[in-house]
Image (tube, rainbow, N blue to C red):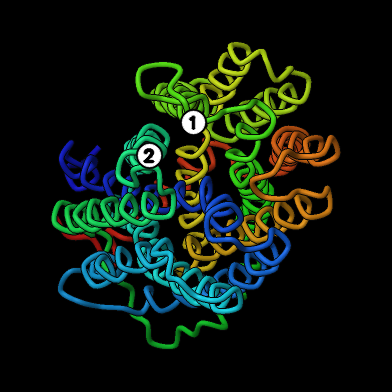
Amino acid sequence: MSDIEKLSIREKVGYGLGDTASNIFFQFVNIFLLYYYTDVFGLSPAAVGVMFVAARFWDAINDPLMGAVADRTNTRWGKYRPYLLWMSIPFGLMGYLCFANPDFSEMGKLVYAYATYIGLMMVYTAINVPYSALMGVMTPSSEERTKLASYRFVGAFSGTLLISLGVRPLVRELGGGDEALGFKLTMGLLSVVAIVLFLLTFVWTKERIKPQDENGASIKQDIAFLFRNRPWIIMVIAAILTLSNVAVRGAVTAHFFKYYVGDDGAPVFWFLDKTSLMLTSGSIAFIIGIFFTSWFSKTFGKRNSLMALTLLNGLTLLTFYFIPAEDFGLMLAVNALGSLLAGPTPALVWAIYTDVADYGEWRFGRRSTGLVFSAAMFAQKMGLTIGGGLSGWMLGYFGYVANQAQSPEAIHGIRLLFSVLPGLLAVANGIILFWYPLTDKEVADIEAELKVRREISNPVTP
């Protein structure tokens, strides 16, 4: 492997810090926003479900547009890195405003929720699409990108661990018993952390694959090529299923532990209550699993590893439906196993997307890295839209009433949303990957041919 293909440890760590920043917000929103809106801010779950669908649908449309814009950006810092600098402060500010808890009327609160949530998702798109695409231009080596993806998701789930470990205790301590104040101050603190981490990613990374000549290249043509890219289509379907699973389960996690398990917020281990302990132990298991990514990739191939691990994780999610409320220890064990199995999957997914970008360049002569990644994020946002909408609507359907003793029907609905529905979505995701066509050998052949093409046109600089 040439020096141009290798990345330093500092650069890999720097890139990973960007996903720590992203996941501080992603996990905070995914785990706590529905609970915050229903139990703290005072909105109805059905209204929140409608808002999630409307906001995330608009957000999903923004992703491919942002990818096309980023692909056509040319600065002395590159195509994608400058957005980390330009959007980091707006990113932190919008996160804080989402949890600022203004004293408005019921309608005013709903309007404020729409405005701030849509604003947050738009800024998230503006910084996260270029961040994701950056991985595809830091090195031309598929092997190095797989390693880089592992660093990225160690960073990502370090952010998840920070949310799992810290949010509920911080809300309790900073709020002094006032949940609204606690959420506001906690998000303010974490917003500053996210801004700093994105700025470090900007400083410590570098783009090495030079921009192509954009003469004659249209967005319409790039999108047409994308829909002829079969590996991308399979990964898009898988992404919708994955994020639907994540959104449904994450949205009702706080409800599941508060109303089914009976978590009253009292510490059960160190300073952690049952919810925090479950989330923290799962995050640690997930991070441990990430370190097996390269082993799985080299031993079984990226596609086979992703398919098998996804199916096994789906079975652990389904198991939760059969665990009694009082058997918290078994919940911890099953959750840790599922998280360990799922650990390598995000890194495998994003490494595969860089292969998909290579395939597009090899097949069609156009490397639209930003569009490939943004369109993948479009699919993920559609999954979040479906999952987020279902969680709010189904809570309302089963008769959920915030801060009240729940009916047996409501408890049953919460259990279904936490276990059966995400489990079935995960299994469907594993099955669809049977149709992913690229083997690791084909990826290596494509990489070798692209290397020759780039050397001829000399687009890569040390």
Residue shown at 42%/51% (left/top)? 449
The secondary structure type at the circle numbered 1 is loop
444 horizontally vs 144: left or right: right
Q: Quarter of the image containing the C terminus?
A: bottom left
Seen from this angle, which residue lies furthest bottom? 216
For the image, the number of numbered tags is 2
Q: What residue type is labelled 1?
A: Gly
Q: What residue type is labelled 2?
A: Arg
Q: How crowded is mark 1: few (under 14 residues within 10 Å), some or many (20 or more)?
A: some
Circles 2 and 1, Cβ within 8 Å, touching? The answer is yes
Q: How crowded is mark 2: few (under 14 residues within 10 Å), some or many (20 or more)?
A: some
Q: Where is residue 124 in the image (x, y as percent from the top left)?
A: 41, 65
Q: In which quarter of the image is residue 416?
A: top right
Q: Which residue position is annotated with label 1?
A: 265
Residue shown at 60%/73% (left/top)? 106
Q: Which mark is residue 172?
A: 2
Residue shown at 59%/33% (left/top)? 306
> Does residue 143 sit above or below 119 in this rendering?
above
323 horizontally vs 375: left or right: right
The secondary structure type at the circle numbered 2 is helix
Q: Nearer the viewer, residue 176 or 353?
A: 176
> Does residue 447 sit above or below 215 in this rendering?
above
Q: Name which of mark 2 and mark 1 comes first in the sequence.
A: 2
Q: Can residue 119 be seen at all in this image of the molecule?
A: yes
Disc 2 versus disc 1: distance between alpha carbons? 9 Å
Q: Nearer the viewer, residue 72 or 99?
A: 99
Q: Nearer the viewer, residue 315 or 431?
A: 315
Q: In which quarter of the image is residue 134?
A: bottom left
Q: Position of residue 240 (x, y in %)?
A: 66, 53
Q: Quarter of the image containing the N terminus?
A: top left
Q: Can residue 421 be seen at all in this image of the molecule?
A: no
